[in-house]
């Protein structure tokens, strides 16, 4: 079987919930019309299963994926179809968004909470992440409201409010253990990306730098503001610097400003994302945690390696 004809139908659920059960797998098998089921295996019993299959030249992967998703209906299972070429399935570069992807919060919203204006800030954040507002304009609008916050305030936000999403350390640790490079990129702020990157084990991070005066926010950031196109540029820069073909790259995010890098990556994943992002990504995760990105690459649970926090400055 030529690798180029192979696909992997991957079913994943929330870890420990046992959502991937026999009836779910049987329904998936029954929808592989026009294709050939080559093999199947548990990646994590009850949580992740894959079926390797071959489609004829005139077969439509998109049609097959849609059939399986419709057949499974309301099952708490994410259904994705990825290329199973052994040479490219396991990615060598991870570029991940931070807010609501690697961490469970939007940092700028939590900064607003310090001043009692979280709802006001969060409403603008939500509209910007759905693509209803210009990202740069929305960022400037929110930052102007946060002028006067101190470095100590920001540290308390990180210490008391920011949580690492389940599976983040395993995602980064496993990919790095297999020779991958992991970069955290954000339209947010280096104050937070530097700390999250160290805590999770990323190799590097990129974000906007907050401007301070006398230890307080001025309400501005250094120009140019890093947004959608900057994230794409970082993906391309990191791949080129390591001599990697785009097929060996993985990008993950949840908002519209992640779309450019998600589209360009060999595997672009929408993680608990806005509908417009999920509609354009090559894979979408709603029920599972970040370890689902490892299952998409064919890693079994036994192969997962949790990253340790970096200790460098």
Image (tube, helix red, strand yellow):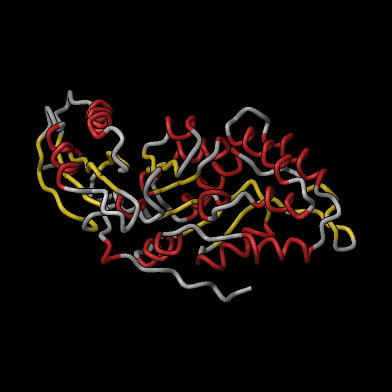
Spot the residue most to the bottom.
Answer: 311
Residue 45, horizontal then vertical, whole percent: 21, 58
Give the number of marks: 0
The residue at the point 66 percent across, 63 percent down is 158
Q: Quadrant of the C terminus?
A: bottom right
Q: Name the residue located 79 percent from the left edge and 52 percent from the top edge.
A: 115
Q: Of all residues shown, which one is farthest toward the right? A: 214
Image point (56%, 63%), residue name: 197
Where is residue 214 drawn, in percent x and y? 90, 62
Left or right of residue 238, residue 188 in this image:
right
User: Residue 54 falls in which quadrant of the image?
Assistant: top left
Q: Nearer the viewer, residue 304 or 84?
A: 304
Q: Position of residue 19 (x, y in %)?
A: 27, 49
In the image: residue 21, left or right of residue 233: left
Residue 268 located left or right of residue 101: left
Question: Which residue occupies the foreground of this view, 227 or 291?
Answer: 291
238 up-or-down from 172: above or below: above
**In front: 4, or 215?**
215
Q: Is residue 63 above or below residue 102?
A: above
In the image, residue 45 sits, relative to residue 276, either above or below, namely below
Question: Residue lying furthest top in this view?
Answer: 58
Residue 83 at x, y percent in the picture: 26, 41
The N terminus sits in image quarter: top left
Q: Nearer the viewer, residue 200 or 123?
A: 123
Q: Residue at x 15, y 53 (%)?
A: 41
């Amino acid at each position: 079987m030529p690798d180029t004809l192979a696909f992997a139908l991957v079913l994943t659920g929330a870890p420990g919930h046992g959502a991937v059960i026999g009836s779910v797998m049987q329904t998936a098998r029954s929808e592989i019309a026009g294709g050939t089921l080559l093999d199947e295996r548990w990646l994590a019993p009850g949580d992740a299963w894959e079926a390797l299959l071959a489609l004829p030249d005139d077969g439509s992967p998109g049609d097959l994926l849609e059939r399986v998703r419709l057949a499974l209906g309301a099952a708490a299972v994410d259904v994705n179809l990825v290329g199973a070429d052994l040479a490219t399935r396991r990615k060598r570069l991870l570029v991940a968004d931070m807010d609501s992807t690697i961490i469970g919060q939007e940092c700028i919203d939590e900064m607003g909470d310090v001043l009692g204006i979280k709802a006001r800030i969060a409403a603008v954040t939500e509209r910007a992440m759905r693509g209803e507002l210009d990202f740069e304009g929305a960022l400037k609008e929110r930052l102007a409201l946060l002028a006067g916050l101190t470095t100590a305030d920001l540290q308390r936000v990180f210490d008391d409010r920011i949580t690492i999403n389940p599976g983040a350390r395993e995602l980064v640790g496993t990919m790095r253990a297999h020779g991958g490079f992991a970069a955290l990129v954000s339209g947010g702020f280096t104050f937070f990306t530097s700390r999250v990157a160290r805590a999770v084990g990323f190799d590097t991070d990129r974000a906007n730098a907050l401007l301070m005066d006398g230890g307080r926010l001025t309400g501005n950031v250094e120009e140019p503001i890093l947004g959608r196109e900057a994230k794409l540029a970082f993906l391309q820069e990191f791949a080129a610097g390591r001599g990697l073909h785009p097929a060996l790259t993985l990008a993950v995010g949840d908002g519209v400003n992640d779309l450019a890098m998600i589209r360009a990556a060999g595997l672009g994943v929408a993680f608990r994302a806005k509908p417009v992002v999920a509609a354009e990504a090559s894979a979408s995760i709603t029920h599972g945690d970040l370890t689902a990105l490892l299952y998409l690459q064919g890693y079994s649970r036994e192969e997962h390696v949790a990253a340790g926090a970096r200790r460098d400055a």
